[in-house]
Image (cartoon, rainbow, N blue to C red):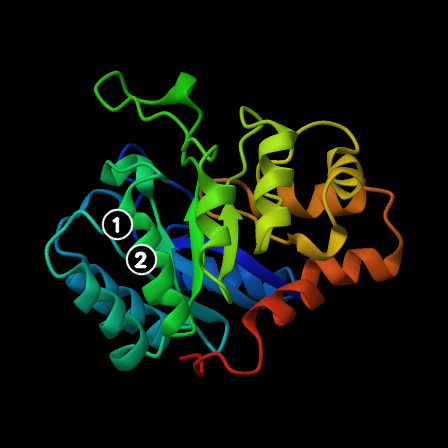
């Protein structure tokens, strides 16, 4: 069984993606033995009305999810009423977590608002997913060059938030192993595999960071789902390690006290 911690609903704004129809997305996930998929919304990158984005995400997860899709709402601490967006995610939509896109929303990780957001999410027992990049800068439209998030400040920020559960998404190879190690050592920080590159890349990752901090993520439908499966198959990891990445580590991160899924 697979828990995919990184899928997206709605439309990628710059090109059509096969699988961006929610019914087809769920059908693909079921075919590949995914029992749970943590879903954000592409609309959360550029839309200003995130309350409506999160309503649509929750509705789509209920309508099409078939018990698989788990909504993770979008929050932008640079917008008015972002604290209310956090409250709605937890109280009204019963979401177990939120998904952040700092590079698209225009703030750095040493911004005091980011630290405040982490504390508020932790107080509400929400998982925080931090998307480090969405697309390789070489393929981005000329008018939308968005560099990856600089995680240099992250280790110091997460130390100030006891109880934080943080997952790094789309861990681009442009960020050094040392930066990842510092962040993962500072608190309960995990990383998913969708952007792990190279032959035996997953096996190397398991040597560089604790295996219990590595989660399965496909970044579907932006990436082909099979890409993440191939990384698992060619990793050379034993069955217990593969099960930990595909399922056990995500269940630990979600925890028994998380909100009920939709």
Pointer 2 local density, CA inside 10 Å: few below 14, some 14–19, many at least 20: some
Q: Nearer the viewer, residue 226 or 257?
A: 257
Location of residue 107 with respect to 8 vertically, above or below? above
In the picture, measured across the screen, residue 1 lies left or right of residue 150, that is right
Q: Is residue 72 above or below residue 221?
A: below
Q: Residue at x 30, y 71 (%)?
A: 58
Q: Is residue 137 visible?
A: yes
Give the residue displayed 61% in from the left and 40% down from the top. 182
The residue indicated by pointer 1 is 113
Residue 90 horizontal/vertical position (percent) = 32, 75
Q: Is residue 119 left or right of residue 238?
A: left
Q: Secondary structure at mark 2?
A: helix
From mark 1 to mark 2, how far is it between C-alphas? 6 Å
Name above or below for residue 127 compared with residue 149. below
The answer to whether the residue labelled 1 contacts the one labelled 2, judged by CB atoms less than 8 Å apart, is yes
How many marks overall?
Answer: 2
Q: Position of residue 148 (x, y in %)?
A: 41, 29
Q: Quadrant of the N terminus?
A: bottom right
Q: Which mark is drawn over residue 170?
A: none
Residue 248 image-quadrant placement: bottom right
Q: Secondary structure at mark 1?
A: helix
Q: Work out which quarter of the rendered image holds the C terminus and state it.
A: bottom left
Q: Residue at x 34, y 52 (%)?
A: 115
Instruction: Using the image, tell me which numbered label, if any, was put on residue 117.
Output: 2
Q: Position of residue 82 (x, y in %)?
A: 18, 59
Instruction: Give the residue drawn at x 75%, y 62%.
Output: 244
Q: Residues within 10 Å of mark 1 (few under 14, many from 20)?
A: some
């Amino acid at each position: 069984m697979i828990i995919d911690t990184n899928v997206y609903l709605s439309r990628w704004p710059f090109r059509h993606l096969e699988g961006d129809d929610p019914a087809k997305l769920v059908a693909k996930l079921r075919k590949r033995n995914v029992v749970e998929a943590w879903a954000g919304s592409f609309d959360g990158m550029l839309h200003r009305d995130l309350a409506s984005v999160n309503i649509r995400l929750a509705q789509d997860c209920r309508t099409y999810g078939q018990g698989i899709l788990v909504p993770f709402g979008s929050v932008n601490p640079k917008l008015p009423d972002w604290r209310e967006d956090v409250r709605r995610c937890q109280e009204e939509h019963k979401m177990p977590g939120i998904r952040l896109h700092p590079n698209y929303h225009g703030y750095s990780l040493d911004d005091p608002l980011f630290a405040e957001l982490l504390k508020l999410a932790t107080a509400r027992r929400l998982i925080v997913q931090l998307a480090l990049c969405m697309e390789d800068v070489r393929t981005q439209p000329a008018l939308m060059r968005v560099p990856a998030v600089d995680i240099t400040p992250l280790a110091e920020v997460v130390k100030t938030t006891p109880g934080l559960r943080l997952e790094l998404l789309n861990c681009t190879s442009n960020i050094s192993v040392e930066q990842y190690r510092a962040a993962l050592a500072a608190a309960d920080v995990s990383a998913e595999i969708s952007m792990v590159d190279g032959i035996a890349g997953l096996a190397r990752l398991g040597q560089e960071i604790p295996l219990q901090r590595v989660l399965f993520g496909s970044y579907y439908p932006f990436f082909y789902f099979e890409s993440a499966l191939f990384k698992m198959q060619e990793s050379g990891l034993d069955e217990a390690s593969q099960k930990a990445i595909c399922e056990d580590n995500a269940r630990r991160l979600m925890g028994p006290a998380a909100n009920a899924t939709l």
